[in-house]
Amino acid sequence: MLESMSLNVLIVDDNRAAAELLRELLELQDHTAQCAYNGQQALDAAAEGTFDVALIDLSLPDMHGTEVAQQLRAGHGQGPAPRLVAVSGHAASEATRGLFDHHLQKPIDFEALDRILA
């Protein structure tokens, strides 16, 4: 994995095991990472802290990931909106283009994630 500056990353995924594994991998790279397991938890976390990057699963139990992204872009949270990365089992769609800065297809290619974080 590429060496990059330390970032504060919000991981939004209802698959707890996948989110925790990703958090552990990011922390091994000296990033700070926090998990949210639904859209409301993600918005609450953003209201309490500042994130450089948000990795947002599009299929969440309480709201679609695009809704989370729209609220983060609209200033729901502290500081500027984080760099938004859609994470999905599907290819990028018209709904995600323009709203997200990047799109990662599951399973996540960690080299691609490193390039995004660099």
Image: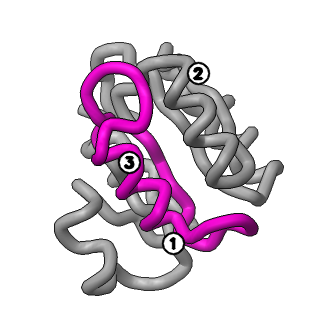
Q: Please identify, in this view, whether the residue under mark 3 or under mark 1 is nearer the observer.
A: 1
Q: Residue at x 77, y 58 (%)?
A: 15
Q: Where is residue 69 in the image (x, y as percent from the top left)?
A: 40, 55
Q: Position of residue 82 (x, y in %)?
A: 32, 35
Q: Which segment is the magenta one?
A: 54-83
Q: Which residue is drawn at 53% across and 35% down?
A: 10
Q: Please identify, in this view, whether the residue under mark 2 or under mark 1 is nearer the observer.
A: 1
Relative height, residue 26 to residue 100 (above, below)? above
Q: Position of residue 111 (x, y in %)?
A: 37, 49
User: Label 2 sits on what residue type?
Assistant: Glu
Q: Which of 52 and 2 is in front in this view?
A: 52
**Secondary structure category for the residue under label 2:** helix
Q: Which of 29 and 117 is in front in this view?
A: 117
Quick check: marks 3 and 1 in contact, CB under 8 Å?
no
**Secondary structure category for the residue under label 1:** strand
**Which badge, 3 or 1, comes first in the chain's sequence?**
1
Q: Which residue is drawn at 51% across and 72% down?
A: 88
Relative height, residue 45 to residue 19 (above, below)? above
Q: Where is residue 84 in the image (x, y as percent from the top left)?
A: 34, 48
**Which badge, 3 or 2, comes first in the chain's sequence?**
2
Residue underneath mark 3? 113
Residue underneath mark 1? 88
User: Label 3 sits on what residue type?
Assistant: Leu
Q: Which of 43 and 26 is in front in this view?
A: 43
Q: How crowded is mark 3: few (under 14 residues within 10 Å), some or many (20 or more)?
A: some
